[in-house]
Image: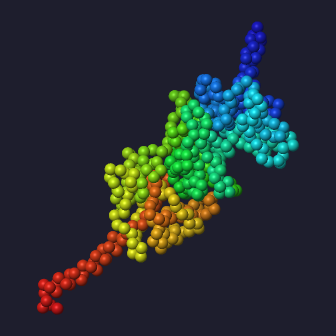
């Protein structure tokens, strides 16, 4: 009887292990009600409905947490499945992965873009990193889900920002809490340079993080709690430019999410409360794009507020978004000086001047009276990852826009009018003749 009881228990357990297969083959298509589970049990892939109505189904990947479905990737986000009777995901004999609906229509496809090594067929594998990979049997990857993200960036994966200096990838927020379709907010590289990232609201800039500097290239760290450290990197691999982040061993589940409200958050799973907690979030307070106006900067310390650099004053104290104006106008040809602003997120709309030392960068701006400011970063310890050992930025024109006092920031040098020492000398030159004239009037016999 004990043997029979043990056999019966094994019979109950076996289906669970059968459902934990991490691979999709031509012989084993995936249908609603079935899932792939990554080898270590971290992620699941299957069909889901964002609401309890089950009117629309999506193919997605989520953390394999009992009682919790946190979706991190959606295949057919803009083409939901309305008739679920015979929908299936299958690997084809042409080395592609296709999602068919009940009428045989293609709802989504992962295309094989290479021909090498495909004689023996392909397999799709869900990895413990959350990456879903279409792979030749010889081990060559021909497609992967992390190159086509939705609203989430997972740790230890590479987010492709640009390819051959052209815009490639963006994460795009859900349209709403129960609507995975593409929303208004997106996050990706600035199309005019490979030196900064943006959160976009449609086509308009919504939030601009710090411009690439030594820290962001070689690895900025963030202490999210007493046991977890996050490190971020930007790097080139051939013609491809990537963003990635890692978390320390033993860290809880971690993800970067762009939500439907435009917030970019670093979240970690709390095993005590069984919920996601926000470790870091942007935007905050006055650090929305250009919220402090021309020449104004957002000081996020304590209560975030807009301030003016030295040598500037508010245009309107009742409306800080109007920005700041110079106390003294610049005059081309006159001797100017530069004030140093430490710990600054440098302004937008810069000109990147390559292969300059600090002195050469300063001279680049000083000798050009239309140059309003400059900033310099030494990238030597990053191994010239951006194709240059330095990063010299200069600003020309009338305004400096979207500045912030920030962590992992740098010195910004802003051009002002005559230096105090030069003014003092000029004042002395004016006062000497006046003093002599007064003495002449008072004591004419002395002349």
Where 410 falls versus 428 (above or below)?
above
Q: Residue at x 56, y 68 (%)?
A: 356
In the figure, is residue 117 to the left or right of 344? Answer: right
Nearer the observer, 377 or 200 = 200
- Return the residue nearer the eye: 133 or 97: 97
Reply above or below: 198 against 391: above
Residue 53 can be seen, yes or no:
yes
The quadrant holding residue 229 is top right
Q: Residue at x 60, y 44 (%)?
A: 171
Above or below residue 167? Residue 440 is below
Residue sitting nearer the eye, 415 or 294: 294
The quadrant of the rendering that contains the C terminus is bottom left
Name the spot of residue 440 as percent of width and height, x first: 16, 86
Location of residue 13 in the rendering, given as x and y in whole percent from the top left corner: 72, 20
The relative height of residue 260 versus residue 398 in the rendered view (above or below) is above
Return the residue found at the far top: 1
Q: In the displayed structure, does residue 81 sit left or right of residue 245?
A: right
The residue depicted at 75 percent of the width and 33 percent of the height is 105
Q: Which residue lies furthest to the right in this view?
A: 119
């Amino acid at each position: 009887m004990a043997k029979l009881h043990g056999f019966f228990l094994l019979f109950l357990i076996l289906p669970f292990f059968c459902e934990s297969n991490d691979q999709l083959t031509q012989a084993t298509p995936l249908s609603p009600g079935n899932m792939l589970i990554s080898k270590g049990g971290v992620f699941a892939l299957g069909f889901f409905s964002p609401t309890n109505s089950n009117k629309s189904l999506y193919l997605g990947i989520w953390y394999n947490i009992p009682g919790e479905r946190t979706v991190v990737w959606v295949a057919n986000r803009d083409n939901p499945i309305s008739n679920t009777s015979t929908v299936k995901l299958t690997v084809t004999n042409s080395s592609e992965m296709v999602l068919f609906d009940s009428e045989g229509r293609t709802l989504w496809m992962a295309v094989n873009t290479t021909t090498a090594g495909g004689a023996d067929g392909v397999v799709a594998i869900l990895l413990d990193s959350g990456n879903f990979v279409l792979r030749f049997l010889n081990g060559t990857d021909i497609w992967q889900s992390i190159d086509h993200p939705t609203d989430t960036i997972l740790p230890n994966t590479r987010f492709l920002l640009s390819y051959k200096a052209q815009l490639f990838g963006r994460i795009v927020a859900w349209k709403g809490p129960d609507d995975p379709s593409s929303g208004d907010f997106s996050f990706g590289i600035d199309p005019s340079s490979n030196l900064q990232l943006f959160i976009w609201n449609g086509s308009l800039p919504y939030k601009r993080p710090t411009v690439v500097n030594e820290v962001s290239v070689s690895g900025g760290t963030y202490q999210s709690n007493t046991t977890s450290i996050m490190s971020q990197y930007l790097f080139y691999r051939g013609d491809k430019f990537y963003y990635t982040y890692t978390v320390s061993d033993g860290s809880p589940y971690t993800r970067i999410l762009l939500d439907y409200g435009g917030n970019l958050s670093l979240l970690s799973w709390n095993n005590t409360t069984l919920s996601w907690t926000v470790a870091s979030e942007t935007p905050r307070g006055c650090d929305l794009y250009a919220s402090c106006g021309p020449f104004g900067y957002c000081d996020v310390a304590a209560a975030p507020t807009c301030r003016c650099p030295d040598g500037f004053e508010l245009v309107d104290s009742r409306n800080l978004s109007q920005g700041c104006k110079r106390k003294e106008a610049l005059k081309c040809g006159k001797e100017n000086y530069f004030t140093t602003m430490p710990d600054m997120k440098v302004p937008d709309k810069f000109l990147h001047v390559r292969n300059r030392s600090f002195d050469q960068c300063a001279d680049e701006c000083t000798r050009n009276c239309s140059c309003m400011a400059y900033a310099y970063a030494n990238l030597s310890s990053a191994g010239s990852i951006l194709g240059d050992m330095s990063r010299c930025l200069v600003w020309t024109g009338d305004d400096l826009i979207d500045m912030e006092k920030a962590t992992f920031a740098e010195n910004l040098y802003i051009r002002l009018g005559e230096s105090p020492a030069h003014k003092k000398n000029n004042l002395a030159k004016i006062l000497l003749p006046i003093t002599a004239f007064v003495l002449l009037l008072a004591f004419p016999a002395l002349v």
